[in-house]
Image (tube, rainbow, N blue to C red):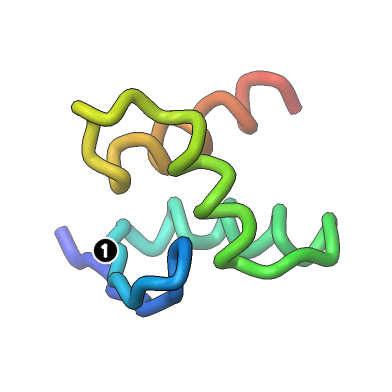
């Protein structure tokens, strides 16, 4: 399975996030529809996740929840 890695600033720190292209597609559609930055969406997901959960997992769960409520 191929991952796509993107770099961004999260709370003032550079980080990278690797997700499958299908997850990035949903994230990209959402940020475009909401006219917001990728960093702001990922920061929001980060702020609301359990600190014991990896950020990549939290983003995947966020995507699934978006698709379930669509």
Q: Is residue 31 above or below residue 69?
A: below
Residue placed at 30% from the left, 71% from the top? 15
Q: Position of residue 21 (x, y in %)?
A: 39, 63
Residue 14: image location, x then y, percent: 34, 77
Of all residues, the one furthest to the front in this rendering is 12
At 33% from the left and 24% from the top, the residue drawn is 50
Quarter of image, res 16: bottom left
Is residue 21 toward the left or the right of residue 63 in the image? left
> Would residue 24 appear left or right of 58 to someone viewing this image?
right
Q: Nearer the viewer, residue 13 or 46?
A: 13
Q: Nearer the viewer, residue 68 or 35?
A: 35
Q: Which quadrant of the view contains residue 54?
A: top left
- Residue 40 or residue 17, whichever sits in front: 40
Q: Quadrant of the C terminus?
A: top right
Q: How many marks?
A: 1
Q: Position of residue 34 (x, y in %)?
A: 83, 56
| Left-right relation of 31 to 67 | right
Tell me if residue 62 comes above or below residue 17 in the rendering. above
Q: Residue furthest left?
A: 1
Quadrant assignment, res 8: bottom left
Q: Which type of secondary structure does the marked residue at label 1 adopt?
A: strand
Q: Is residue 18 above or below residue 50?
A: below
- Residue at 52% x, 52% y is 43
Mark 1: few/some/many CA within 10 Å (<14, 14-19, 20+): some
Residue underneath mark 1: 18
Left or right, 57 with respect to 33, comes to left
User: Which residue is at a point 44% across and 52% down the rendered structure image?
Assistant: 23
């Amino acid at each position: 399975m191929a991952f796509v890695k993107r770099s961004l600033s999260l709370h003032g720190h550079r980080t990278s996030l690797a997700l499958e292209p299908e997850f990035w597609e949903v994230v990209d559609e959402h940020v475009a529809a909401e006219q917001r930055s990728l960093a702001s969406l990922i920061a929001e997901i980060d702020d609301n996740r359990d600190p014991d959960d990896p950020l990549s997992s939290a983003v995947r769960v966020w995507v699934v929840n978006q698709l379930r409520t669509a």
